[in-house]
Amino acid sequence: MKFIIANWKMNKTVHESLDFVKKVSRAKTRHKVVICPPFTSLNSLASALKGTNMLLGAQNMFHQDSGPYTGEISPSMLKSIGCDYVILGHSERRIHFQENNEMICLKVKAAQRHGLVPILCVGETLSERRNGNTFDAVARQLSLCLSSVKGPNILVAYEPVWAIGTGNNATPEQASEVHSFIKLQLKKRFGKDIPVIYGGSVSPSTIKSFLSEKSIDGVLVGSASLETGTFLKLI
Ligand code: PEP
């Protein structure tokens, strides 16, 4: 069993989300499938996914429980509607919304406090890779985002920034090398094996090569998770 996590990003109305789930939720799979729709579709999908073997995740949240934070969503709100997972620190949030490692760390802790499993995204930029700084960049993100995080109830997504939405996936060997490094850091940190999944232009034609790597515990998929036919091939 490996994880297949769909990150729909800012795509699909509630109607489109429900229509998608109706078409795929009875599909047989031996993997753990998690769908992360936009906030507006979460509540409807929580009902639609009941009784299926698919789980629900959010794409972001704020770290406070409640209060004057216009436009934000709290971990308890997510938990109360049946979310199990939340993607945190996605590179698109770091790039477009200036999220930094310190903010992400607060979110990781808040998610865990409320019984949500954080899917913490880390990954190097193209220039970091070209300059031979991949491991340093990833180690720094891990160290800062997990600072004083106690519980091992977490998933880490290795998402090289240059591979997200570009059609330019890392090779399974490149991913595996970084996964082994991340797994070692996490084992030292938590004394336990933590799942590490790969994200970055995964498609039906490449998914097998990733899932067959021992160090890759699953995939986080953006574009290829949006269309039912492609998604069914993935799962
Ligand atoms: C993502 O956004 O997490 C992602 C992996 O996107 P894509 O599959 O489109 O590269």
Image (tube, rainbow, N blue to C red):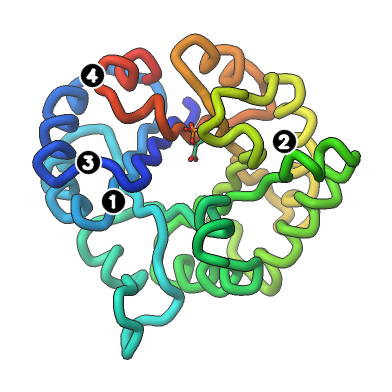
Q: Residues within 10 Å of mark 4 (few under 14, many from 20)?
A: few
Residue hosting label 2:
179
User: Between residues 193 and 92, which one lies in front from this camera angle?
Assistant: 92
Instruction: Say whether residue 118 is left or right of residue 67.
Output: right
Residue hosting label 4:
27
In the rendered image, the quadrant that contains the C terminus is top left
Q: Residues within 10 Å of mark 2 (few under 14, many from 20)?
A: many
Q: Are marks 1 and 2 in contact (CB under 8 Å)?
A: no
User: Is label 4's Cβ within 8 Å of ligand 1?
Assistant: no
What residue do we see at 61% from left, 24% from top? 168
Q: Secondary structure at mark 2?
A: helix
Q: Secondary structure at mark 4?
A: loop
Instruction: Say whether residue 74 is left or right of residue 107.
Output: left
Of pointers 2 and 4, the one earlier in the residue sequence: 4
Residue hosting label 3:
12
Distance between the Cα atoms at labels 4 and 3?
20 Å
Residue 175 position within the rendered picture, expressed as x and y whole percent measured from the top left: 71, 29
Distance between the Cα atoms at labels 2 and 4?
29 Å
Of pointers 2 and 3, the one earlier in the residue sequence: 3
| Image-quadrant location for residue 24 | top left
Residue type indicated by callout 3: Lys
Return the mark for residue 38. Answer: 1
What residue do we see at 60% from left, 58% from top? 152
Residue 45 position within the rendered picture, expressed as x and y whole percent measured from the top left: 17, 46
Of pointers 4 and 1, the one earlier in the residue sequence: 4
User: Is label 2's Cβ within 8 Å of ligand 1?
Assistant: no
Of discs 4 and 3, which sits in the foreground?
3
Distance between the Cα atoms at labels 3 and 1?
8 Å
Of discs 1 and 2, which sits in the foreground?
1
Residue type indicated by callout 1: Pro
What residue do we see at 57% from left, 66% from top? 98
